[in-house]
Amino acid sequence: MSNITVIGAGYVGLVTAACFAEMGNSVACVDIDEAKVGFLRRGIVDLYEPQLEPLVQRNMQSGRLSFTTDIRDTDPSPDFVFVCVGTPLNGDRIDLTYVYTAFTSLAGFLAASAARVVIKSTVPPGTSKEMAALLSRMRNAKGVQPVVSNPEFLREGRAVHDFQNPNRIIIGATDACAAEAVADLYRQVNAPLIMTDPSTAELIKLASNAFLATKISFINQVAALCESVGADVTELAQGMGFDHRIGRDFLDAGVGYGGSCLPKDTQAMTELMVAHGLQPWLLQHVMRINGEQPLRLVDKLEHALGGLAGRRIAVLGLAFKPNTDDIRCAPAISLINELQFRGAEVRGCDPVAWNRAAYAFRGQVQCLHDPYVAAQGCDAVVLATEWPQFLGMDLHRLAQEMSRPILVDGRNSIDPEKAQEAGFTYIGVGRSRLPAPAKNQAAITERGELVHVESSK
């Protein structure tokens, strides 16, 4: 068992602290937000993340996990300190203010400690080296204590699962002993382990998210071509995805990517290239395509309705993805802003994030959690987030609530045929050719076999 101090009780820090405690370690989590720490001490998690709150409660009850606002209340000689503070964009660059603050607080606290210091926050290459030098200067140390980079790859909505079942573990260090010590913390985890230098580790995180963003923007641009030539992007993506070099993940055309990671990290990667004299044309276009994608959906809706002024629209899904209440850079927000700009009256709906969104819109948008109530009297509904609650809706009931049943499927997640049967005018992304009736329709199974699906009607 190791004694671990985690600085930052936000999304990454809280998951990290709780999961390390679940592995049997003694973990103290530090955050300057007194209200947040107060809630956590009562076992209340102030963000929506499946599995996280019971995990926190269980490990607090066992005595393995504690929370404080003062690092001096933690073990003065921890084995590891994980820095998991926020690194938001400041303009176009990653803001390291909170990272500097964390290391400043560590300088005096670790004066007599040999703790391994690990950065889990997303930071630009060179940060671990810079923080190691800063820590050594402030401690008046003769040598530079190595700082290890251990970037996180947690997907919101699946963060606990991803920590316990990662695709890979990346450790960047200049000191082999420090790298091995951090690697030993993950001995219970079955995943590929990659040891490299800190700058490479830091860049792996940025490059990974920038690539995923590129893949999404690529398929969205192909979707526009599909609409022009009469092809179906969902079948196209399936055909591409069977090639293991390409893969099916992140080839879902729709309203675009959002959240706290892909937009920020793609922008940071772009600015990093500019700072080093490179031309980031590819990533610039990736971001431009993504920014335009919500506007394309609004254009389709405006065309279908013959104008948006005075129209009542319900946007289903306000979080940037299902199983989270995070609305940061959510495509739904851009959709709503554009709809309002063109004169529409908009209602927002989300099973979890509705309250957070209502606060963000400051009363300018009515936010609800029931899609049937949100759709009452509406001229159209737009699916912006593929929550299971929305995919399982009674489409006949939804259509009956509306004054004009038009459905814009911004995630290509609703069966067009079922929507049409319910009386909807269905508008998808890259689906200018709607599926043929089920009778004798060729389909591809997950094993890649060509089969013929007979109609059940």
Image: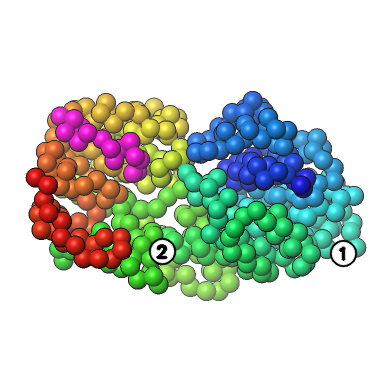
Q: Which residue is mark 1?
A: 143
Report the front residue among 358 and 49.
49
Quadrant of the rendered image containing residue 355? top left
Tell me the kind of residue under disc 1.
Gly
* Residue located at (65% from left, 53% from top): 188
SS type, badge 1: loop
> Is 38 drawn above or below residue 428 in the view shown?
above
Q: Amino acid at mark 2?
A: Thr
Residue 214 tag number: 2
Give the quadrant of the C terminus: top left
Say which residue appears at 77% left-offset and 35% top-offset: 70
Task: Say which label, 1 or 2, has the lower sequence index.
Answer: 1
Give the residues in magenta.
385-400
Residue 106 lies within the magenta run = no
Q: Residues within 10 Å of mark 1 (few under 14, many from 20)?
A: few
Residue at point 77% right, 67% down?
175
Mark 2 closeness class: few <14, some 14–19, many ≥20 residues within 10 Å: many
Relative placement, left or right, of 60 versus 247 is: right
State the scheme by which the image is colored.
rainbow
Residue 133 percent across, percent down from the top left: 79, 61
Q: Is residue 245 left or right of residue 70?
A: left
How far across and down, in percent of the image, does residue 412 sit?
26, 50
Could you say which disc has been placed on residue 289 in the image? none
* Residue at image location 39% in from the left, 60% down from the top: 249
Can the viewer see residue 433 in this picture?
Answer: no
Asked whether disc 1 touches disc 2, contact meaning CB atoms under 8 Å apart, the reply is no
Q: Tag 2's secondary structure? A: helix
Front-lying residue, 38 or 124: 38
Q: CA distance from mark 1 to mark 2?
A: 42 Å
Main structural element of the magenta stretch: helix, strand or loop? helix
